[in-house]
Amino acid sequence: MKATFLFLSIISLGISVSAQTNPVISAWLQNTTGTKGRHYVNGNSTPINDADSVNVQTVAYSANSVYIRTKGVPSYITGPFLDGNPSITTNQNAIFKLPLTPAQNTGTPTNTTGGNIGLFVNGVALFDYRDGVSWKNSANALAGGPLGGMGDQVWNRDAVVAERIGFDCAKGHPAMGNYHHHQNPSAFKLDLNVISTVCNLYDADGLYIINPNQHSPLIGFAYDGFPIYGAYAYKNTDGTGGIVRMKSSFRYRSITTRTTNASGATVTAGPVVSATYPLGYFREDYEFIAPTASQSDYLDAHNGRFCITPEYPLGTYAYFCTVDSNHNSAYPYVVGPTFYGIRNVTKVTAIAEPVTIYNSIPSAISNTTFKSIDVSVYPNPANDMIAIQLNNMLNDNLSVSLYDMSGRLINKTTLYQGSTIAYFDTKTLYAGDYLIAVSDGQHKLTKMISIAK
């Protein structure tokens, strides 16, 4: 599939904000209009409207902490989950407490665990690589069966590989209603090599679009408080070297049988490597190869590095969502298998200290300010698809329209406040120039794009 992406990113608008601008306070996608979630059910490509509000409801901060109130529901449509998962995305009614200043763990690294290990900027949970199943457990072994239960925790199944059929178009699924991502949260249909057809019938957006020409956005925070970015960043840690894909330093082991771990120690045998259980089906199929000094675009054992980013011009430790050259997810995907910092993000039932509420969205903007939205096209000319992406600084729904040069409306969609991506299919359009118009009902901006066939 050839896809062309139109990116809208709102540049600095010159609006003074009284609250702090620490990214752990300012980066969240807040829902101020009450936009509700939507989901698909298997066999019906018309989304069903839900009762729960999407994204983050409130952000509050104290001298040392920030509190994120979220229902765990994304603005993109969730479901269906074609592996038979009966669950749907449900309200998590959660408050997460994050540190304003995360700290490195200088002792033994803390392992990631099953369940939540991070939070995306839309309030949706991040899980690590695992799906909670290992090759054997005692009861199943006695019955002569394979997978089941937590087992002996030697050959731990990789959810991204083993549960692919159960992910929706946005690469997520729920665990007892807790919708989450194990991997880079960009829709399957936008990968250079599309490995799932779920978007064909159940179209949805992801959290962001991979743009190889721009530093990927800050898309979340791990449970040690350090930021998580998308797949692309500055090649060198000092912010130089151009934009490149961040690469995992984990590699497939050179094995055909599963009888030892990466250190060479003998362990409980798992299944032989086969088409049914290919390399990568289990976490223990990987080994870590430390990058050399010249491999600045390769990540450490936590899947991150200390570097300069747009939000942290003085540098920070940051995790990255690793993908391969086709933009398919690459182990360990986001964080892990250990944290860089001290794990200290907690889920609380109430805020027990004085806090200030943070509002990242200006109540009103001028026509001049609206027109300062920076629109870029990647690539231009377009081919099969135009994808529109923007951040969450405006307090209204936006209409996004596609016109031909005679002024005839070709297509129109709504980008709801709290959403970040919209699409136009251009496969049936003639080659030539077209206009994209973005409006909040009071202000409008237009940009020209070209479509080539």
Image (cartoon, grey):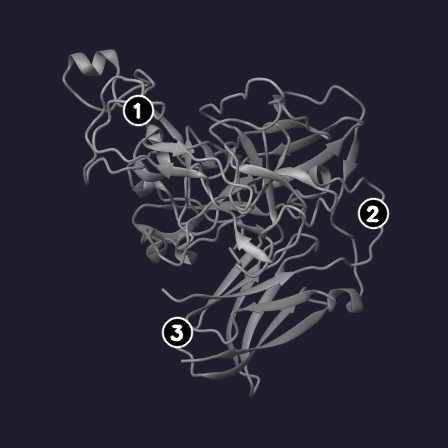
- Left or right of residue 326, residue 440 in this image: right
Label 1 secondary element: loop
Q: Amino acid at mark 3?
A: Lys
Of marks 1 and 3, the one in the foreground: 1
Foreground of the two, 384 or 408: 384
Which image quadrant: the N terminus?
Answer: bottom left
Question: Which-is-in-front pick, marks 2 and 1?
Answer: 1
| Contact (Cβ within 8 Å) of mark 2 with mark 3 | no
Q: Residue at x 41, y 54 (%)?
A: 325
> Around disc 2, counting alpha carbons within 10 Å, would you say few (fewer than 14), some (14 to 19), or many (20 or more)?
few
**N-term mark: 2 or 3:** 2
Q: Position of residue 169 (x, y in %)?
A: 40, 49
Identify the mark at residue 17; answer none if there is no mark. Answer: 2
Q: Is residue 123 visible?
A: no
Looking at this rendering, what residue extends furthest in the bottom direction? 406
Residue 116 in view (yes/no): yes
Q: With respect to residue 28, does 109 lie above or below?
A: above
Relative to 443, residue 108 above or below: above
User: If you read the primary sequence from the N terminus, does the residue marked by circle 1 or circle 3 appear first?
Assistant: 1
Determine whether, in the image, residue 35 is placed left or right of residue 362. left
User: Based on the displayed image, in which of its 4 quarters is residue 59 positioned?
Assistant: top right
- The image position of residue 378, as x and y in percent, is 54, 67
Q: Which residue is mark 3?
A: 427
User: In front here: 414 or 122?
Assistant: 122
